[in-house]
Image (cartoon, rainbow, N blue to C red):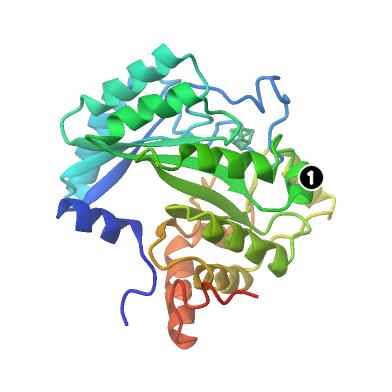
Amino acid sequence: MDQRYNDLNSYLRAIYGCRVQKITIDAGLNCPNRDGSISYGGCIYCNPRGSGTGAYARGMSVTEQLMAGKAKLSKRYKAKKFIAYFQSFSNTYAPLDKLKSLYEEALAVDGVVGLSIGTRPDCVTPEVLSLLQGYADHYLVWIEYGLQTASNKTLAAINRGHDVQCFVDTVQTTQGRGIRICAHVILGLPDETRADMLRTAQLIAKLRIDGVKLHLLYIVKGTRLEALYRQGSYICLKQPEYVDLVCDFLERIPPQMVIQRLTGDPHPHELVAPRWALEKAQTLTQIRETLSSRDSWQGKFFNTVE
Ligand code: SF4
């Protein structure tokens, strides 16, 4: 068995018959958990750059970012079609007309076949969902909601500024509109046990989410998590622990859920720990090998979870 999980590339190739790549967009938007609407500090692990490319700060428009991404990715992967991925901060957190203009600028670029909008579950309105629903008739439209964990205790500890019910309600409001939903989940959050993390898998399985991105919690310079780490209050996962947790997680979610990511991409100059987080290819290989040695696959224990 070669394919032990339903990866994004295979999913996109099955729809379009060619290599499709996501191009990251930094649209210069903000986040209510950083601008004072909810808090100023943000989530304790939040990179002040918003996981962004800094392209907006360098004055690049959405079109310019997409053109640059297309040039690079068509050369590297022979990609022929592209998804505009609005990644930095909360990409539904702006007036509707501004969002419409940003999204439609992206969709007007030749070769762009869809949108992927990263945001918080407390940051979408019915009007934004109706806007995206309108695009979904002609384009592939994903919305990516940060859940991170199904534990309210942990959400409070990491200063997320929303609870689990907010995520559940937003998912249910989004479903039935032709918009695909991806949940972001972090493994290794402070004081979380394996059972906590597998409860998160159970929640997204039960909600019939369309896709998931799994992230390792790593420590970025200048964050509150860095302070916790330096005072010994937070210990990072080790690579074998993370690999085992990812496999446990995959086994408990539906086989058709699209796996959009299995670990993150820390910037080497911003990363404090763990250093193994930079070994992405090795981590992915170990995940595949572990699934193979367990004779396991995505969804093996779906419906039979403890
Ligand atoms: S929701 Fe995202 S951008 Fe906002 S504070 Fe948390 S990590 Fe940062």
Pick whichever, 138 or 236, lies toward us: 138
Q: Is mark 1 within 8 Å of ligand 1?
A: no
What residue is pinned by disc 1? 157
Task: Say above or below: 101 vs 71.
Answer: above
Q: Residue at x 25, y 28 (%)?
A: 107
Residue 60 in view: no
Count of marks, rendered view = 1
Q: Residue at x 22, y 34 (%)?
A: 138
Q: Quadrant of residue 156?
A: top right
Q: Ligand 1: which quarter? A: top right
x and y, in percent, of residue 137 in the image: 25, 35
Q: Residue at x 83, y 55 (%)?
A: 232
Q: Quadrant of residue 139?
A: top left
x and y, in percent, of residue 211 in the image: 43, 53
Q: Quadrant of residue 73?
A: top left
Q: Label 1 neighbourhood size at 10 Å, few (<14), some (14-19), many (20+)? A: some
User: In the image, 46: left or right of 292?
Assistant: right
Residue 128 in view: yes
User: In the image, 235: left or right of 75?
Assistant: right
Task: Say above or below: 76 vs 281.
Answer: above
Q: Residue at x 44, y 16 (%)?
A: 96
x and y, in percent, of residue 32 in the image: 63, 24
Q: Quadrant of the N terminus?
A: bottom left
Q: Quadrant of the C terminus?
A: bottom right
- Amino acid type shown at disc 1: Ala
Q: Secondary structure at mark 1?
A: helix
User: In the image, 100: left or right of 235?
Assistant: left
x and y, in percent, of residue 274 in the image: 63, 58
Task: Say above or below: 180 vs 52.
Answer: below
